[in-house]
Amino acid sequence: MAIFKFYQIHRSIREVLGEEMSIKIFPEYAILPDKMPAKEQAELGRKIMDRMDRLLDENTIKKIRQMHTCNPSKEQVAKIKELKEKTNSFDEFLQEYSKFLAPGYVRKDKDTLYVSFGLEKCVCGMFRKLETYEPISKTWCECCNGHVIKTYSMICDKMVFSEIVETIVCGGNDCIFKMVI
C-alpha cells in the first residue's frame, strides 16, 4: 500500500482527470515505496503540486485537493453539537467555539468569517514532523481548506465556500481561512 496521503492525491487526480493525467501529474506513484523519510515526502509533494499548478486551472486544483480531506475530529463534532444546543445565537456559538479552538480563533466581520488554526507549525501530517522546509504552493493547503469547508458547512448547516488567506507551509505566520456566510 502506498503512503496514504499520496494514495489520496493519486486517487483524487484519477477520479477528476482520468488515468492518463494522473500519470502525467504523478508519475512517481507507480514506483512509490511503502515508506519514505519525511523530507523526501515533502519534496515529492512539492513536485506534484508544482505540476498541478503548471497543468491545471484553479477550480480543477481545488476540486482535486478538496476531494478527500480530513473530516472534523470526533471531539470537534461533539463540541459543535454541544455548542449548537447550548448557545442561543450564531454569534454566541462562534464566541464559544473560538475558546475551543484556542490558540486558534473564529472572527466574524459582518458576513465574513476568518478562521485561524493559531499554531506556530503546520498541522498537516506532511510537514508537522519537519523542523524546516521550503515554502510550498498553496495548492497543497487546499486540502486543509477542504477540511475547513466540511467543518463550517456542518456548523452553518449549509454549504460554505472558503479561501486561503495565508498558511504556515506557504511561508505565512498562521493558517487563516476566509468564508463568506
Image (tube, helix red, strand yellow):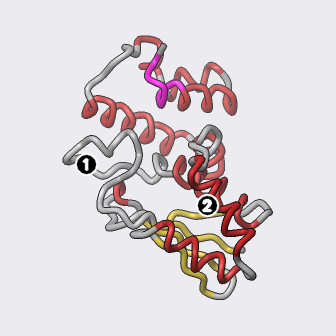
Looking at this view, name the residue that lies furthest to the right. 158
User: Residue 91 location in percent, x, y?
Assistant: 67, 83
Kindly identify the amino acid type of the residue bearing the numbered disc 2. Lys
- Give the Cα distance between marks 1 and 2: 35 Å
SS at circle 1: loop
Q: Nearer the viewer, residue 107 or 87?
A: 87
Which segment is the magenta one?
2-7
Q: Residues within 10 Å of mark 1 (few under 14, many from 20)?
A: few
Residue wearing tag 1: 134
Which of pointers 1 and 2 lies earlier in the amino acid sequence?
2
**Per the image, is 35 magenta?**
no
Residue at the limit of the structure toward the left, as seen here: 131
Residue plotted at (33% across, 18% down): 35
Would you name the residue on which mark 2 appears? 79
Nearest to viewer (mark 1 / mark 2): 2
On-image quarter of the C terminus: bottom right
Instruction: Using the image as rendered, state which of residue 20 and residue 150 is in the foreground.
Output: 150
- Residue 49 visible from this viewpoint: yes
Q: Image point 60% across, 82% down: which residue? A: 108
> Please, what is the dominant secondary structure of the magenta stretch?
helix
Residue displayed at 30% across by 62% down: 120
Quadrant hosting residue 12: top right
- As displayed, is residue 20 above or below residue 8? above
The x, y position of residue 123, in whole percent, is 39, 50
Q: Is residue 123 left or right of residue 157?
A: left
- Disc 2 is placed on an element classified as helix
Q: Position of residue 41 (x, y in %)?
A: 33, 31
